[in-house]
Image (cartoon, helix red, strand yellow):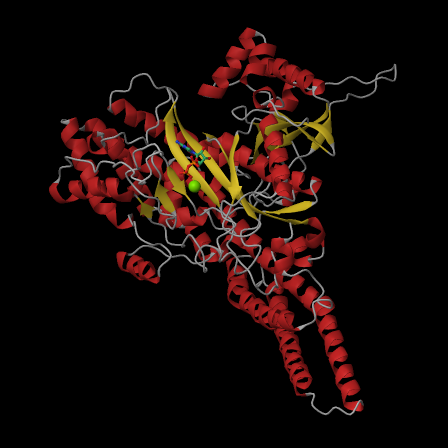
Amino acid sequence: MGEYTNVTEIFGEDVFNDSVMQQRLPKKVYKELKQTILEGKELSLEMADVIAHEMKEWAIEKGATHYTHWFQPLTGVTAEKHDAFITAPLPSGKVLMSFSGKELIKGEPDASSFPSGGLRATFEARGYTAWDCTSPAFVRHDAAGATLCIPTAFCSYTGEALDQKTPLLRSMQAVGTQALRLVRLFGDTTAKRVIPSVGAEQEYFLVSEKMFSKRKDLVFTGRTLFGAMPPKGQEMDDHYLGTIRQRVSAYMKHVNEELWKLGVAAKTQHNEVAPAQHELAPIFAEANVEVDHNQIIMQTLKRVASQHGMKCLLHEKPFAGVNGSGKHNNWSLTTDTGVNLLEPGYTPHENIQFLLILSCVLKAVDRHAELLRESASDVGNDHRLGANEAPPAIVSVFLGDQLTDVMNQLITTGMADHSIESEKLETGVKSIPEFMRDTTDRNRTSPFAFTGNKFEFRMVGSRDSIAPANVVLNTIVAEAFKEACDELEKAEDFSLAVHDLIKKNFTEHQRIVFNGNGYSQEWVEEAERRGLPNLTCMVEAVDALTSDKAVELFEKFGVFTKAELESRQEIKYETYSKAINIEAKTMLDIAGKQIIPAVIKYTRNLADSINAIVSAGVLDVEVQTELLQRTSRLLKETRDAMEHLKTVSDKAHEMEDGRDKAYFYRRQVIPAMDDLRKPVDELEMIVDKAIWPMPSYGDLLFEV
Ligand code: ADP
Ligand code: MG
């Protein structure tokens, strides 16, 4: 790639998108495929053959030799199995390149070792991948060459969802159907579909690959399990939105170009709060496309980093005591005619449709706060949610001054007759053009904030898929819409009924609205008084998946069966236990093989120097002796903590998979890990840096 990039030229060049399809497919086929994409009409195998052929020809022109059904099993990342396009050699000894409609539509990866949570016994391990034509296929270029990637859903032999995408598509149907009913009530006769739009802001850390490879904890677990705080952290706030360093700039340029080629509209990039932390945000897209794009973004961030001698850390908390990483999931609902249903307009108090939708969202979030919290639960995210960092584990909604005022007017007087107006921003500098200030300031501490014309759900972890959060959002809002429509469609006096319903929703669910500081202890107490759930860790949150309320909700909208929910729950307990087990084992390994030997070496050096000094006739070795005593004491503490960690993690490991085991890891193993970390971090502050066996936080954070 030359120095200058022509973005419009490269954008989408590796995507089998609408314009490529229009160009390459016979008109009739194109029309039918569009109907399938937009209306879910069934696609004949004959058509699929034509599409597959064109897709293959196009991909081969891009250099592709293989194709893969690209899917998202319940591991949080994507999976793929590659097949070459070649046919069996002909009598002439040559091969042809072929790709049939059947191969496009259906795949059967030997995927029996993906987590299925008991939905598939191994002896009946068939799982199918099925083409999701609503998300475009693309050609990816990497060390493996060029591969045609076909986004697919992944289901069991009996049709149960084994992936993130199937429930997402189901939930999009659910909310789309109910939202369409709702806009019809307000006289919209032209919209044919309502689609959730999502834009996910991705945070990540960059560290030097050289440093990374010297830290077994980063290599095996994605986060540091030991590490004393550097003398300088983020307290100076000089990194946040700071000038981007040249090496990082070159990386970001490369990432953007790769993403643009894949049709991902990477838009903003900046430094984040912590040193070495950055963020990338694309322009929003339809929910299922954005879920795929976010996976592409994560993969691209990682792949490109290695080409620049760096490692991209997507873990939610790579460094204790330093700001962690999350993903802000921006969500709204848009009609196919381009109307954003979350747009309040200048006078929200008069926008009845918006107020109804807003009141339904409040109802949905209040009623299913546990599920929303659960949707963001992930092993790494436990270090953020409910730990010492933003956002809190308590779900609440930030509405801002203007909308809260409208809500309060409705609740108290039954009438909303004005909206707080925006004011001019006065800077006191004549040469700065005046502009109107937003009606509401931002609130960075809220986990679910209304930000102008969308909701921003900020709990999702940086490494996690955004699919579960959107599945929950779509479904809970579908339910509130359904209840509203059921009532309003029968109403004799629509305006009266809608007014009453808005007031009722606001009144009953106002407790979920909180505009204050979400990080404060007062809020924790206030939330408890309001009866809002505070699920401080993943294992507690996962319990919510199979509550009666959750099962009823998801079954009503065909998003999950009870069995599917149970399987997901089981997988999450298992994932949790496995992840903590790996962390515990890694700690023991590092402590035993690297830390203890280093500390012993250091104490031997100390002892030698004490002897030498004394033999030279100097008797004052108080400082050296004290240091030796302190180091030996910490060494013993380390050894004891290791023994304890080993005992509890062995015990945990032997337990049967499931809820009890996960809770045991949470309650016994994690505290034992903390106990081991403490003396080791203290030792790091004492022991000679030349002897310490791995790069420090300072090395990792400030030497990219
Ligand atoms: P903010 O300043 O509120 O963080 P940005 O304009 O930076 O908002 O956008 C953040 C993310 O939200 C981007 O990914 C953007 O594309 C996305 N976004 C903007 N509008 C919408 C919308 N209506 N629906 C969903 N996502 C949106
Ligand atoms: Mg944001």
Q: Foreground: 319 or 660? A: 319
Residue 264's quadrant in the figure? top right
Q: Residue at x 57, y 36 (%)?
A: 297
| Left or right position of 539 against 103 | left
| Left or right position of 176 against 690 | left
Q: Position of residue 79 (x, y in %)?
A: 63, 38
Residue 99's quadrant in the figure? top right
- In the rendered view, tell whether residue 105 sits above or below residue 274: above
Q: Position of residue 140 (x, y in %)?
A: 66, 29
Q: Residue at x 44, y 44 (%)?
A: 562
Quadrant in the picture for the N terminus: top right
- In the rendered view, tell whether residue 176 sits above or below residue 252: above
The number of numbered discs placed on residues in the rendered structure image is 0
Q: Position of residue 4 (x, y in %)?
A: 63, 26
- In the rendered view, tell whether residue 330 sits above or below residue 679: above
Q: Foreground: 500 or 279? A: 279
Q: Residue at x 70, y 87 (%)?
A: 621
Q: Residue at x 59, y 68 (%)?
A: 677
Q: Is residue 463 visible?
A: no
Q: Position of residue 87 (x, y in %)?
A: 77, 21
Q: Is residue 104 visible?
A: yes
Residue 133's quadrant in the figure? top right
Farthest-out residue, top: 27
